[in-house]
Image (spheres, rainbow, N blue to C red):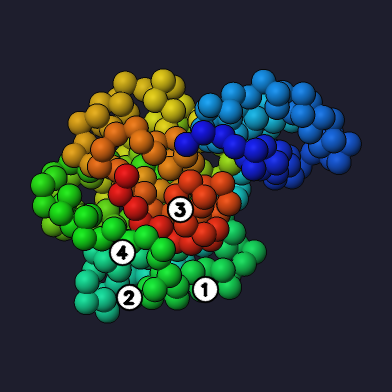
Amino acid sequence: MKSVSLCYPCFLKQAYSTLAYSGVDDQKRIWVLRELANMLPDLDPKQSPAYNSSLVLFRVHDLSGHGDPYADERRNSNQMALDMLPALRQKLAQASDRLDAAVRLSVVGNIIDLGIQHQASIDETMESAMGEGFAVFDMDEFRKALEASKRILYILDNAGEIVFDMLIIEELRKIGKTVIAAVRGGPILNDAVMDDAIQVGLDKVCRVIDTGNEFLGVIREKCSGMFLKALDTADFVIAKGQANYESMEGTRPNIFFILKAKCQATADHMGVKENDLVFKRA
């Protein structure tokens, strides 16, 4: 997916959010945003939104002097999701189709970064996900891919959300699949890193690796050899969230994307409406 005009205000919006979490005063925020405005003309629209957003956010880290402003937010999101885990497991136990339910529940975690302030958003998305809320739900294709597959790479998105993803991974392991989970190689926004995987106990469920870099999504030329080996030898890939979709769509066969289309640009590219839930094979 290439960057479009709608992406540029979003780059600055993410930058402002990062500055807010950095705790810098308003005068410094204005100065940083002015500096960022100067770099926007140099961003390549042929690159994905995830790539360009990463460049902007790296510059925010440099100018603000804060390399991991979301550290507390990530820990809080993880704990919030862990507190929900017993109820999630109960809902899964009551399901007639556990794998189907696990996939549906996982998309709820894709809004966990909003959930601290908006519990209603989680409850609403839960109801939608367990009902008719998916605009695309390629479950039949997912089952067919599973039948012919052994090794699965699961590329994670946000902290907190990874607790929901753990439910799918557990179900896949129960049916004999080998799953490797991947987090970001360093802090950017509230994306999950290795410390988050350890905090929620994901490392005790499956092998966890990182991408080898701090970019949003998967930017192949920036990834470590270990991650690329896992990516290239996987029978298929599950990728969570918009940044993974933006950067990986069209890059290889057998990728299943699970996300909520949080912006119009991504929704348009996927052929759905903004805020739709999507489980899509690409």
What residue is pinned by disc 4? Answer: 102
**Pair 3/1: label in front:** 3
What residue is pinned by disc 3? Answer: 271
Q: Residues within 10 Å of mark 1 (few under 14, many from 20)?
A: few
- Measured in 3D between alpha carbons, the distance from the residue under mark 1 to the one under mark 2, in whole angstroms, is 18 Å
The residue at the point 22 percent across, 77 percent down is 96
- What x and y, as percent, mark residue 36? 74, 28
- What x and y, as percent, mark residue 73? 60, 50
- What x and y, as percent, mark residue 234? 21, 36
- Out of 281 and 177, give the one closest to the viewer: 281
What residue is pinned by disc 2? Answer: 90
> Mark 1 or mark 4: which comes first in sequence?
4
**Pair 2/4: label in front:** 4
Q: Name the side, left or right, on which 33 lies relative to 223.
A: right
Q: Secondary structure at mark 1?
A: helix
The residue at the point 38 percent across, 75 percent down is 131
Report the amino acid beneath label 4.
Ala
**Pair 2/3: label in front:** 3
- Out of 211 and 246, give the one closest to the viewer: 246
